[in-house]
Amino acid sequence: MRVLLVDDHALVRQGLRAVLATTTDCDVVGEAGTGEEAVERAGALHPDVVVMDLSMPGAGGVEATRTIRTTLPAVRVLVLTTFSDDDRVRAALTAGATGYLLKDATPEQVVAAVRSTARDEAPVDPRVARALLPDAPVPARDRGPEPARDRDPDLPPRERDVLVRIARGLSNRQIATELGIAERTVKVHVGSLFRRIGVADRTSAALWARDHGW
């Protein structure tokens, strides 16, 4: 996959390039140090994934993300930043970012997040996922029967299970493992879920879940 690195610190870009160079499927095709450069390079290079910092001179990462996702909807954006506060997370995801990772992530987590972003699986740091939800999710084995709540639309039980895990930032493979079902079955549930709640991607589904009390 083709990756564009965006960060105003050359040392950070160099480190990311070195990390991705250890893989056989990630090709860094360019770098940018500002939001304006990010938009320009994305338009010229058409990467599969843009790894985007938020705090940069000029147009920041949120605005650059919004412009890239509007003009190049096939390009996915993975935010890589030091900020985990709710306002910045919401702004980035609303602008169209597919995933959100913090800079204290390990090299392995960065590589995994880039790959997940390319697959449009919305990788989200658990600390960020908790910031998006009213309360940290409780593992299913620790929960009692769920009280009935008036939700619109009325989702089938399995799609409720999938939605809760999408809101936690889990990939289809991780959801399949937790629920003990095939990954292809998860994909079917995800497609049906998106149609029921009127969203087009996992990030929007996670925000919908948060807004509806999941």
Image: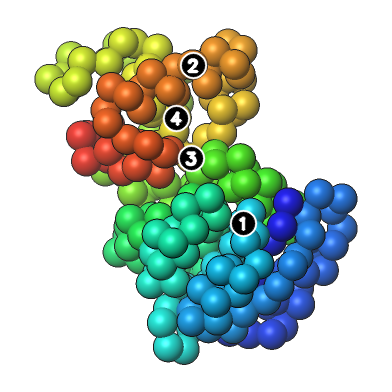
Q: Which residue is mark 3?
A: 169
Q: Look at label 2 and name its amino acid.
A: Val
Return the disc, 3 or 2, that comes first in the chain's sequence.
3
Q: Mark 4 is on which residue type?
A: Arg
Q: CA distance from mark 3 to mark 2?
A: 18 Å
| Few, some or many residues within 10 Å of mark 4 (<14, 14–19, 20+) | many
Query: What residue would you read off at disc 2?
Result: 188
**Mark 1: secondary structure:** strand
Kindly indicate whether the residue at mark 2 contacts the one at mark 4 (C-beta within 8 angstroms). no
Residue at image point 55% right, 81% down: 37
Give whichever of 157, 48 is nearer the camera: 48
- Label whose residue precedes the other's in the sequence (2 or 1): 1
User: Element under label 4?
Assistant: helix
In the image, 95 versus 74, the foreground residue is: 74
What residue sits right under mark 4 in the picture? 165
Q: In this rendering, does residue 211 appear at all?
A: yes
User: Looking at the rendering, in which quadrant would you find the C terminus?
Assistant: top left
The mark lying in front, picked from 3 and 2, is 2
Residue 66, percent across and down? 39, 64
